[in-house]
Image (spheres, rainbow, N blue to C red):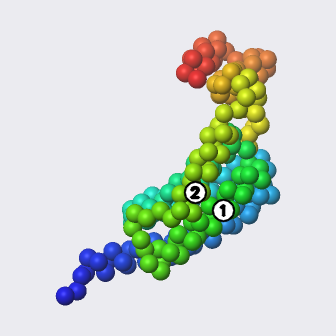
Amino acid sequence: MDNPAGLEEQKFLDNFILTAQALCREIEEAATTLESAAGGARAEQLETLFRSFHTLKGNAAFFGLKGLKDASHCLEDLLGGARKGSFPVDDKFFRLLWKGIGLVSGEITAAREAPQRNVVTPAVDAFCSDVRAQVAAGAAPDPGCAIRSTDGTRYRAGTEDVSRAVYILKDYIARAGAGSATAEQGEKFLERLARG
């Protein structure tokens, strides 16, 4: 007897794999572009990569492809750290990124050939452990220092990131200096600063 539900599920999985392969090619292009990008272009590529891995992670989870989901999630964490400026976009970052892209590509190929549900390979497990350790280490800068991120300078008071408050203050000072800040704007500034 035929299993129409199983055939339908296989059709969805096949479609996902084709889409994932195309997305992986786009990821490789974005990663190549990121290597030479600076400033706003770098931030845009980080965002593109982050969204791509987020999409892969969710779709892989839907199909129970745990290895692909976990590898994509770790890359999402790596890119999230880079987007926030807590993990520098340097040689170490690119080594992890390209290693992860290779693992994701391999997981997609494995899913096409013989999908294994809820299985994580030792390579993906080791990669995720490495990424978690690197991101955690990168997220703890020296207290009291200002760090350079991909999207501008970050300001810290002790271990707390106070960049938003500094940018709000700079904006208000610039307006006040130009004579365009009103008392109402001053009150709004204080409210925004209090919200952090």
Q: Amino acid at mark 2?
A: Ala
**Residue 55 showing in the rendered view:** no
Question: Residue drawn at (75%, 19%), measured in percent from left and top?
Answer: 173
Q: Residue 180: image x %, image y %?
A: 73, 20
Q: Residue 195: image x %, image y %?
A: 55, 21
Furthest residue toward top = 183
Say above or below: 147 vs 184: below
Which residue occupies the foreground of this view, 96 or 63?
96
Furthest residue toward bottom = 1
Compared across the picture, whether 73 is left or right of 157 comes to: left
Which residue occupies the foreground of this view, 8 or 125?
125
For label 2, the SS is helix
Furthest residue toward left = 1
Q: Are marks 2 and 1 in contact (CB under 8 Å)?
A: no
Q: Amino acid at mark 1?
A: Lys
Compared across the picture, whether 8 is left or right of 140 comes to: left
> What is the count of numbered marks?
2
Mark 2 Cα-neighbour bin, 10 Å: few <14, some 14–19, many ≥20:
few
Residue 99's disc is: 1
Quarter of the rendering occupied by the C terminus: top right
Question: Residue drawn at (43%, 64%), measured in percent from left and top?
Answer: 119
Question: Residue drawn at (76%, 33%), measured in percent from left and top?
Answer: 147
Say above or below: 190 vs 90: above
Residue 134's disc is: none
Question: Residue drawn at (61%, 50%), measured in percent from left and top?
Answer: 131
Q: Label 2 to label 1, Cα distance in Å?
A: 11 Å
Name the residue beneath numbered marker 2: 126
